[in-house]
Image (cartoon, helix red, strand yellow):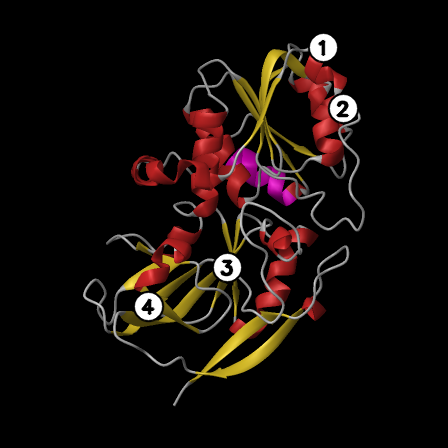
Amino acid sequence: MPRNAQWLLHSRPEGMVSEANFEYFDAPLPELKDGQALVRTLYLAFEPAMRGWMNDAASYVAPVKLGEVMRGAAVAQVVESRRPDFKAGDIISGMFGWQQYAIVDGALDAAQNITRVPDGVPPHWLLSVLGITGLTAYFGMLEVGKLRAGDTVLVSAAAGATGSVAAQLARIGQSEKVVGIAGSPRKCAWLTEQAKLDAALDYRSENLNQRLREEFPDGISLFFDNVGGDVLDTALLHMAQNGRVVLCGGISQYNTAERPAGPANYMQIVLRRLTVKGFILFDWAEHIGKAQTELRRWLSEGRIAHAEDIQQGFENAPRTFLRLFSGENLGKQLLKIADPD
């Protein structure tokens, strides 16, 4: 009988997350009961927000408990089913965690956020451009940011899974100018050559304050921020009057051992009459179907380029997660576990 390899949360990180915070466990295959389906993981997805789930702190979701399977989104194939809505061979996505097999229980569908992979769609797209990151970009840019034609738009972490889609949605929305911030020449080249942004700034090798002054002489009307910290501080100095700031994430802060300081340029929010708003994808859950339909249309028309960094092998789950914080990945970070039957 096959076994169920799992990665458990072994300890809570203090500062930068490490492979030592996870423990490999070889569990027996879960026993299938009436009303359940057994699924086999094909791909795992990794998001920076998962670092926050490892902390023992209140958030928009409960923290992962020590000794529990690490929480995470996956695409899986149904192996055996005792429920009428799934049959063997179906491919679905959901919050199945870092394990090779999982039980889909009718009572847990809301928590697992089950989605059937549409015909003709590569399964791993449900974890990237049509999944959490693509949908976050869609609602953050269009609904929270209130994107409008003629905007001058800046996106941080623009070569990441969320930022890359957000920046291209700004381009599709007829913005006057769209500029991305990334952390290497390779990523900046992808943003201008593949994503077709007007410019890309390398924060590691360029003077961000000077470059923003050059690119936005009349100010930034919409800033989509995934980074926080110094990048947010610098961008606040270049916002236009009545500009909007969408706070999507803060990857620069996730692994700090101490509570980070607030924005040093906080008073720019007052002086420039800025609207600053944070959001969570779950706020827009009832509209996900509409968003996926529009994203699929733009993909089919070739208007959205998307990158995926796909690593291999279940044993590499912790190591793959850490790629998010070293900047190694371009686009969505995925891990391939198996091919579908």
Which residue matches tag 1? Answer: 271
Give whichever of discs 4 and 1 has the lower sequence position: 4
Rendering coords of residue 155 (x, y %):
59, 30
Task: Tell me the CA gap for discs 2 and 4.
Answer: 48 Å
Task: Tell me the CA gap for discs 3 and 1.
Answer: 41 Å
**Mark 1 belongs to which amino acid?**
Leu
Rendering coords of residue 317 (x, y %):
57, 67
Give whichever of discs 3 and 2 has the lower sequence position: 3
Q: Residues within 10 Å of mark 1 (few under 14, many from 20)?
A: few
Pointer 2 with pointer 4, Cβ within 8 A: no
**In magenta stretch: residue 77:** no
Q: What secondary structure do most residues of the magenta stretch adopt? A: helix
Rendering coords of residue 274 (x, y %):
63, 15
Rendering coords of residue 3 (x, y %):
45, 84
Task: Tell me the CA gap for discs 1 and 2.
Answer: 18 Å
Magenta-highlighted residues: 186-195
> Which of the two marks, 2 or 4, is nearer to us in this view?
4
Which residue matches tag 2? Answer: 209
**Mark 4 belongs to which amino acid?**
Gln
In the image, 338: left or right of 324? left
Q: Residues within 10 Å of mark 4 (few under 14, many from 20)?
A: many
Picture disc at residue 142:
none
In the image, 213: left or right of 87? right
**Mark 3 belongs to which amino acid?**
Gly
> From this viewpoint, is residue 295 visible?
no
SS label for mark 2: helix
